[in-house]
Image (cartoon, grey):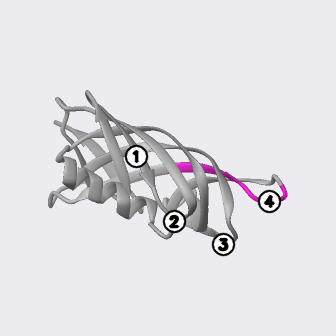
């Protein structure tokens, strides 16, 4: 992974075999921010695990293992109550048949490259806290 900063904007290149969540969490610690918006991302990934939250508040997961085009990525980076970086990302992939797969991204390994834009929110503190009856950490603001 390499990145460049311009003011509160970061542009990140994540390289083959690096996992996106892990890379962005490492970046949050390296740069030292508590809140950021992930505004865009493109590339090609593999070993994707994505899904949605059902009506009972439980995530349903689906694999998308073959390399696929990462068409769109967005989300945010906050901290958990114990101070660890937490990434919440939604994605849209296109497989090699141009069939679209979209939803909450649980994991995604870069196959060729991922290029991601992040906007640091330097005057904000966002904390992820457990939600009642949901498999979700709710975003709280300070």
Q: Which residue is mark 2?
A: 16
Q: Residues within 10 Å of mark 3 (few under 14, many from 20)?
A: some
Q: Earlier in the sequence, mark 1 or mark 3?
A: 1
Give, as a single range, the part of the protein colored magenta: 90-97
Secondary structure mostly seen in magenta is strand
What's the distance in space between the residues labelled 3 and 4, CA to CA? 12 Å
Which tag is nearer the camera, tag 1 or tag 4?
Answer: 1
Please provide percent x and percent y for residue 128: 27, 51
Q: CA distance from mark 1 to mark 2?
A: 13 Å
Q: Which residue is mark 1?
A: 12
Of discs 1 and 3, which sits in the foreground? 1
Q: Which residue is mark 3?
A: 65
User: Answer yes or no: do the residues labelled 1 and 4 have beta carbons within 8 Å?
Assistant: no
Q: Which residue is mark 4?
A: 96
Q: Residue 53: in sight, yes or no?
A: no
**At numbered mark 2, what does the secondary structure look like: helix, strand or loop?**
loop
């Amino acid at each position: 992974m390499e990145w460049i900063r311009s003011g509160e904007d970061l542009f990140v290149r994540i390289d083959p075999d690096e996992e996106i969540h892990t890379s962005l969490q490492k970046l949050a610690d390296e740069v030292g921010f508590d809140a950021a918006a992930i505004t865009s991302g493109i590339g090609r990934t593999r070993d994707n695990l994505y899904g949605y939250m059902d009506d009972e508040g439980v995530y349903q997961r689906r694999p998308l293992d073959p390399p696929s085009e990462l068409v769109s990525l967005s989300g945010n980076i906050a901290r958990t109550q114990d101070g660890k970086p937490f990434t919440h990302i939604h994605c849209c992939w296109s497989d090699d048949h141009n069939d679209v797969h979209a939803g909450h991204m649980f994991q995604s390994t870069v196959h060729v490259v991922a290029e991601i834009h992040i906007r640091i929110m330097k005057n904000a503190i966002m904390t992820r806290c457990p939600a009642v009856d949901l498999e979700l950490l709710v975003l709280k603001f300070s």
